Every structure is written in C-alpha cells, then in structure tokens.
Amino acid sequence: MPVEGGSSSGSASAARHPKQKRKAHSLSIRRTNSIEERPLGIQRGDMLEGQDSKLPLSLRNNLLDLFGQIEREFENLYIENLELRREIDSLNERLTGDGQTVEGGDPTKGALKTKASHSTSQLSQKLKTTYKASTSKIVSSFKATAGSRALCQLLKEYVGHRDGIWDLSITRTQPVVLGTASADHSALLWSIETGKCLLRYAGHAGSVNSIKFHPTEQMALTASGDQTAHIWRYMVQLPAPQPPPDVSAPCDDDQDSSDREEGEVDGEGPCEVPTVRLATATLKSHQGVVIAADWLVGGRQVVTASWDRAANLYEVETSELVHTLTGHDQELTHCCTHPSQRLVVTSSRDTTFRLWDFRDPSIHSVNVFQGHTDTVTSAVFTVGDNVVSGSDDRTVKVWDLKNMRSPIATIRTDSAVNRISVSANQRIIALPHDNRQVRLFDMSGARLARLPRSNRMVRKDMKVCVRSVSQHH
C-alpha cells in the first residue's frame, strides 16, 4: 500500500499496514452454500440434482463423470488386489500341503516374500499413477479452454524512479503519454513509444500514491502522503520515432540493468528532464495520507480518499471543499469514479466498499456493500454497468450496478489482491498480487493468462513493464 513518508523501499515497506496472517489453503472442492447431510446410499446424480449449485449443468456433469472414472479405477485395483491376496493364500496352502515348513531358513519363503513384495509394490505404484492422472484430469477440466487463452509479451520497460511505483495512468487527450506515481515523492510522464521520460512533477513533500489525468485538458491530479492532492498542468512534446536498431552491429544492451546507476533512464535521467514544482491547485482538507484521487465525469470536480477514514469532494476551479463523505470505520484504500455518470466508489480496510451517487444534486445517496471478509484494497468501475472489487481475502468480485445484492462472478486466488485495473476495450481484469504475480481474467471470472516474469536481475519495484495482451477466439 502507498505510504506517507520516506524515499527508500525499506521505509515504504515498514510503513505499510500490517496484514493478518492467512492460513494456507489446501486444494479442495466444497459447496458454497451449506447443505444438510444426506443419508448413505443416495445416488450421486440425485445429490447433484438436488443441490442448489451455481455451477453450470455441463460442468457438473463433467465433474460427476470424472469422479465416476476415479471410482471405477479404484474398484478395478481393489479387485486385482483381492485376486493377488487369494493367489498368495493358495501358494501358502500348496507349500503346507507339500510338507514344507515356512521358517526362517526355508528358501521358498524368500521367493514367496519377494513375489508378494513385488506385487504390493506394483499395486502401490499403479494406485499412485491412477490417482495422479485422475486428479490432473479434474484440475485441467476447470482451466479455461484454449479458445479463451490470451498471449502476453513484453513491449517496453520504463525505468527511472528511485523508489516503488504505486500507480500509473494514461492520458485521455493528445499527446498520449504514460504517467507514474512513486514513493520517491515524484510523478513522471513518459513517451509510450520510445520509453523516454518527458517531464517530472516534484511538488509533493511525500510519497505520490496515485495519478489521474483530466478527461479533456492537459492537467494531472496526484494524491500524496503529505496529506494533500495536487492539480498541475503539463506541456510535453513527444520525441521523434527512433529508427530500428542495426541488429548486425555489436550491442552493449545485454548489460544487466542492475549495473546501471539507480534512477538512470535510457537517454537521460529524471533530473535532466523538465521539472514542474508548483501546483495549479492544492487540496488540503485531509488529516491523513491521501491514498487516491480521481476526476468526476466532466472534470469540474475531483474526489480524494484518505487514511483519515473520509473521502472529500472538491470544486476544481475554486479548490473549495464541497462534501466530506464519511461512514467508513477504518482507513480508505482507494476511490474511483464512473466514466460517464456522477458515481463514486470508495473502498476501505473495514472490509466494505461504498457507492456514492451524485446524479441528483439534492440527494447524495450511499450504499454499503459487505461482500468481503478482509480489507477491500480497491473497487473500480468498468465501461459497462459493473463494479469490480478486490480484497486481501484473496477474492475478486464482479458486481452489476443494477443488482448489487450478490456478485455475478467471484474469482478466488492464492494471494491477496492489490489495486486492480480493467481494460476499457477488451474488458480484461488485471489482478496484481502480493506474491508479485499479475493474472488476467475476463468479466465472467475465467482466467486468461498470467504475465510472465522477467529473468533479468532488475529492481522490479522501480520500473513499469508494459505488455501486449491478445485474445484467441
């Protein structure tokens, strides 16, 4: 989570909120809704038919068929084991009938033991092989089909910050640039095509926790650990596209990026680019870290979220505080605005997220949603009528704004989920995890891909990696 002060990664980590210890979860299949125990002897098909399951019928039938195959395999092995035991008993009886005593020095005993041990070893190995094959088949049946998988490849890296990067954003107007917010007290603007740093904003006295661009003008909104949010203007000129490199010429780019000086960027460092130090407007009504900020539709108002458990609504032109949105019991973790309506969603460590409605000037309604069991790290709107919420409880839930009583999809993961993002065109959900992995899902909860990690020894918390994602149909 973004922090208030300190420019080092160590201090940033130390200032994070402590997270509760989580129990390791073993692979298991269990019901979402509790059901009464049914009497023995009831058919499996009747059990599945009578249960109120959210699984599709085709998936349930496939699951039943796989379990049936496992049962038949074990049944065949059990019969084979019985036959082996009968064979051993028959051999023992034959030895006894021939007058041979099964004692320590009898060579027949060694042969019999060897045969029995070999048969038992074969049976054990066959059981293991059958079990692994059957369970692998079950697990693979839950994976997304090949038709919905996505391919990811690294396109560009943007290296230049001196501490962790908390947020990034793309401008909605020309020229299109990338903005990054960092714990090194700065925000940087980058050329997406060349990876060159174009401008540095150094007006904050604390960690810059988020960055968002105005919908129509060349203005940026940043939230900081110095308890303020800043609105500042920028003017950048995109560099001319560089010719493709000569692959036949010797290249020194194979040098490990960790050997570069900290903060060094291809071409020029952040200190050599134009720097903006004064804000057009400073919003300073919070009593704690401002963790996030966003523009309302139209860009005439902004909303900020803070660790002081409140969200504030401001007028951009006058910097006047219009509303203080209170109700959360603990620190806020994120805020997001709807792309086309006057709606705001805030998330908190109190395990809830709230939907604030400003469409009617005379009524400012709020709805509270308690769909998670741990800190809600972020909640964002999609281009449609959906809200996607992520939590430290290792789940991500997709909600329909028209019916928020229960989620329309739940994604269960193996690690806490940080600040999530949803693509505007392909409706892909990107989930960054505490285990440093990023996974991609569609809006129905089907997993598409996992972004591959780089093998190069680079301090990954100080760079942005942009990857292309293409879906196969």
Image: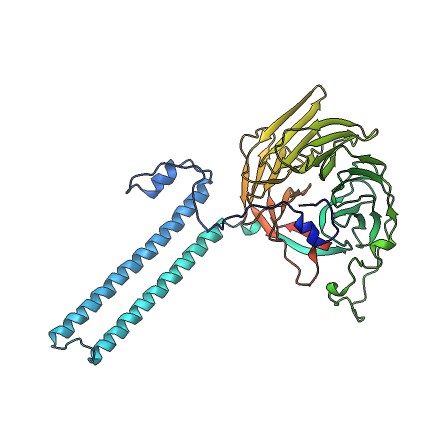
Residue found 74% across the figure and 55% down from its top: 156
User: Relative to residue 324, is residue 107 depicted above or below?
Assistant: below
Residue found 69% across the figure and 41% down from its top: 424
Residue found 67% across the figure and 51% down from its top: 13
User: Relative to residue 259, is residue 211 depicted above or below?
Assistant: above
Q: Quadrant of residue 169?
A: top right
Task: Tell me the colour scheme of the image.
Answer: rainbow
Considering depth in this image, is 183 or 139 the residue closer to the camera?
Answer: 183
Considering depth in this image, is 183 or 27 the residue closer to the camera?
Answer: 183
Q: Quadrant of residue 226?
A: top right
Q: Position of residue 120 (x, y in %)?
A: 30, 67
Q: Residue furthest top?
A: 362
Q: Position of residue 429 (x, y in %)?
A: 63, 44
Residue found 81% across the figure and 70% down from its top: 249
Query: Going by the image, does 2 lie left or right of 197?
Result: left
Q: Position of residue 292 (x, y in %)?
A: 71, 39
Where does the N terminus fall, quadrant-wise? top right
Considering depth in this image, is 426 or 272 the residue closer to the camera?
Answer: 272
Q: Position of residue 94 (x, y in %)?
A: 15, 72
Query: Going by the image, does 182 lie left or right of 14?
Result: right
The answer to whether residue 240 is visible is no
What is the number of callouts on the image?
A: 0
The answer to whether residue 122 is visible is yes
Query: Going by the image, does 51 lie left or right of 92?
Result: right
